[in-house]
Image (tube, rainbow, N blue to C red):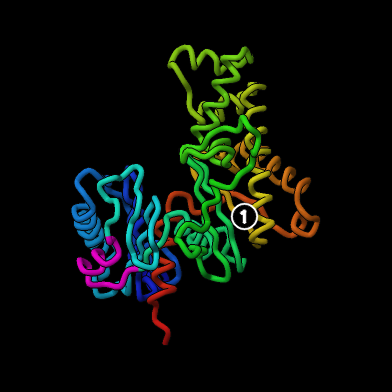
Amino acid sequence: MSAEESPVLPVYLGVDVGGTSVKIGIVDDTGRSLAHGKIATEHEKGPQDGVARILSFARGLLNEAGIVWEDIQALGLGTPGTMNVREGKLLHMPNMSGWNFFPIRNYFQEQSGKPVAFINDGNAAAYGEYWVGRGREHDSLVMVTLGTGVGGGVILQDGALHGDNSHGSECGHIIIDSSPDARVCPCGQPGHLEAYVSATSLVKRAEEQLIAGEASSLAETMEENGSFSALDIANHAEQGDPFAEAIIVETAELLGRGITSIMHIIDPGIVVLGGGVNFGGRESETGKKFLETIRKTVAELTFPVLAENTIIDFATLGSSCGYIGAAGVARKQFGQTS
């Protein structure tokens, strides 16, 4: 490793826990990822087993990066589900029920011998983009992640918005439809943003319209496979299917409504869009149209000064944002001050 490539000490271990996999990375003091990888969560084995495997894998990453355990200043841990951030405890984990009510922060500290910063996974991802990603030139950032569900994170003046009950920054659960027949969110409540713009909801809305008689090349895919994915919708739109294009535009308009409400409350410098549902992002015409439709909808609904000054763009760190952000939060809480 050359002098230019040498890590800037101290370094931090970032951990981004998901229901299927755990992303783990070693991040230096400038936010550069030195080594990273992922392991299967295997949540059915319980949190103690998960922590043991995370730390074992992390030691392998240290060897890969050419540094030692003593170089690690602190650990950052991002997890899904509900939690009590102050107490460092997991609460309800819908996809990891064996981890419910586990004191994850204290156990991680005991097993690692390092201080641990604990944060919601959405805020961890947002902090990564804020620290070294698309939002690095701004004092405040909102991140909305579109995947199977809709997550979010809010960073204000270098701090994540947790709220008094550790339920802050839940961007997917703002209400965009108060009509009696509003779609029901997976959380059980009607009208939430997630019920309209997640990958799951996008596919469901498209299927309903095709069954009702809308014409689309997606109908063949549904007939052959029984269903289709959000990626299929993006691909068919890119190939010029009018129905696929229209439902993506509709999704962008719905998301624009939600982002407008968030902007009116937070007034961030930038809103970034993350997650797997970006319709090709900057690299495709469909992704560009998706983003422009969101911007246009927001401009029509918000105050002129916000429409003019608030940046809305795709995130830049991809799937690395969670572990990088978790490491960044550890750096903020436990970094060297001298």
Name the quadrant containing residue 237: top right
Give the residue at the far front of this rendering.
180
The x, y position of residue 91, in whole percent, is: 34, 54
In percent of width and height, residue 29 lies at 41, 72
Asked if 314 appears above or below 280 in the picture, the reply is: below
Residue at image point 35% right, 71% down? 11
- Whole-percent x and y of residue 38? 31, 50
The N terminus, quarter of image: bottom left
Nearest the viewer among 61 and 128 is 128
Mark 1 burial class by Cα count in 10 Å: few <14, some 14-19, many 20+: many
Q: Is 313 left, or right, of 95 in this rendering?
A: right
* Mark 1: secondary structure: strand
User: Who is closer to the viewer here, 212 or 2?
Assistant: 212
Which residue is rendered at x = 65% and y = 23% of the image?
A: 240
Determine which residue is flagged by label 1.
271
The span shown in magenta is 103-116
**Rendered residue at 52%/47% (across/down):** 145
Visible in this render: residue 35?
no
Can residue 114 be found in the magenta stretch?
Answer: yes
Left or right, residue 250 beside residue 73: right
User: Majority secondary structure of the magenta segment?
Assistant: helix
What's the residue at 46%, 20% (across, down)?
Answer: 227
Residue 4 sits in quarter: bottom left
User: Where in the figure is residue 140, as x and y percent of width and height?
Assistant: 60, 65
